[in-house]
Amino acid sequence: MKTTSIKFGKTNLQNLKHHETVKQHDGKLLYNFPKKYFASNCQGLCLFVYPKPSVKKAFYAAWSIEKYDPATGLSKRYGRYKYICDLGQKPLDWVIDHVNRNLKQWKQEKLSAKSKRTVGGLAAQFIKFGLGGYRVKSKGAKIKYKNKTSAGYAQVLKTYVLLQTKKTKIVSLLTDPFQYNGSGFVTGALKDISLHKISKRDIEIFHTRLESKPTTANRAVAALPVAFEGDMKRSVDRMFPGDTNPCLRVSKYQEKKDKNFLNLNKVIEIRTYLTEEQWRDPHFNTFYLLALEIGERLEDTFRLMWNRPKDQTDLEKCSGWIDWDKRIVHLTDSKDRKSADVHLTIEAFDALQKLMNWRTEDRCSWSIQSPWIFPRRTDPSLPINNDSYRVKLQKFHVKFGLGRVVTVQSEKRGERKYKSRKRKKHKYILDYSFKHLRKTFVTHYGRDEGLEKASFRMRHSSTKVTKEHYFTEDQEALKKDHMYSSNVVKIKKKEYN
């Protein structure tokens, strides 16, 4: 039935007429749908007027929820209602006040209702309420999730658990009948399994379905236990009834670690060019040199400011600033969630000073008003991001033999007389990206100072992290022509009386 919005008043509501029940051509009655009237003077209040022969009128709280349909790739909104009382049971003023005070709570209760107590419901709840709070696996003091971490968890859960993706291959991979360990076929998606029935076996089946994507499978199974832990730590309105996280001790796929790094000769070649030709592209060349010289994470380097900001809002936006007197970069919130002072090499310090001085010249005048060391060219009020130097990096690495250009498509151009002429499309394939500059720094620092010092310098939780993800031993240095010294220690024989 068509819905109508009216001003709710005692007389208006009493005068609403009950409509006739619709009949089919064969004489059977259709479902007795009530007519819904929404209050224009109270958000979320609705009156159901039932068809004849009923004379019932009832107040309901009303709101809508959004659902994603993976088949069509579209989102639709659906109405949700909560019964309050019949018309006349309570005064209208009481009903309006009751809705205003409780509507927000009812929405949350409905989200946690029994019909939503599934793995998908738990994941959606965690994305909406959990990722903005404190980390559930923190061993020490309570610390909040970084934006990058929250975005990563949300993307994995939405795509591979909630199946909110337009890629039909992913949906088919996680929903089609699947034979697990030679037994019968398993059907359905993980998101639809009830939390009262979820088990470790269900998580293992989900993980095995993604066998063709081992890294993705491991990331998904790493995000799921965080969502379960987040729910289990809630003091009220828990969705998962169990006491043991079903995602624990699920064996992960072995991943090939990407520890590629630039050899020392290539580093010297590039650094020489950057220092001598810095003026050609001041901001990009300085950023690249800084990444080589201090080896910090890209996210921390993006949002560096020239000086300590005075405004608290700017202080929260930036990742750190330059202390020119101490020749350091002060990071406010590095990977270990602590502040850090990073020593600047002479080459990095000189490059930053040159860049600062060049801001008054034509080549960099567009950035003079920006507080950021590396502002975005399209909007200097913002710092650069992962896409800002993507094209420049492609051309730079191809120039130094760290990538190549391939033709991916050729098509005819113009009319028939131009048949011999073709327009070619090219694609850059890089062997190294910005992240490999950090691995380059750690490897060469560790080879000079040792693995333990490299781990301490990079503020890693253990040397195991440094070795598995960043540091590569010098295989030539491990070789020995003589295992033991040729000097023979002469031992005098003891003389016995």
Image (cartoon, helix red, strand yellow):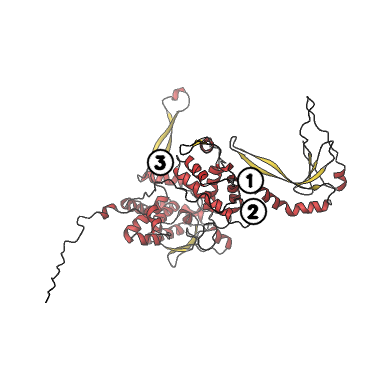
Instruction: Mark 2: give few (<14), some (14-19) or many (20+) Cα within 10 Å.
Output: few
SS label for mark 2 = loop
Label 3 and label 1: CA atoms lie apart by 45 Å
Q: Where is residue 250? Give x, y as percent.
A: 47, 48
Left/right of residue 121 with respect to residue 483 in the rendered view: right
| Disc 2 + disc 1, Cβ < 8 Å | no
Give the structural element (helix, strand or loop) at label 1.
Answer: helix
Task: Give 330 or 279, whichever is nearer the viewer.
Answer: 330
Report the residue marked by disc 1. Answer: 116
Q: Amino acid under label 2?
A: Asp
Classed neighbour count for the residue bearing mark 1: other residues with Cα under 10 Å, few (<14), some (14–19), many (≥20): some
Can residue 152 be seen here? The reply is no
Looking at the rendered structure, which numbered label has been put on residue 165? none
In front of the other: 413 or 128: 128
Question: Residue 429 bears which disc, if any?
Answer: 3
Viewer-nearest residue: 69 or 424: 69
Instruction: Give the Cα separation between the discs numbered 2 and 1.
Output: 12 Å
Image point 65% across, 43% down: which residue? 66
Q: Earlier in the sequence, mark 3 or mark 2?
A: 2
Of the numbered discs 2 and 1, the one sitting upstream in the chain is 1
State the quadrant of the N terminus.
top right
Q: Earlier in the sequence, mark 3 or mark 1?
A: 1
3D distance between C-alphas at marks 3 and 2: 50 Å
Q: Which residue is mark 2?
A: 237
Q: Are marks 3 and 1 in contact (CB under 8 Å)?
A: no
State the image coordinates of residue 461 (x, y, percent, origin top left). Answer: 43, 59
* Percent position of residue 42, x then y: 78, 49
Q: Is residue 340 above or below residue 279?
A: below
Q: Quadrant of the C terminus?
A: bottom left
On the image, which quarter does residue 480 sit in? bottom left
Q: Secondary structure at mark 3?
A: strand
- Image vertical order of residue 310 relative to residue 281, above or below: below
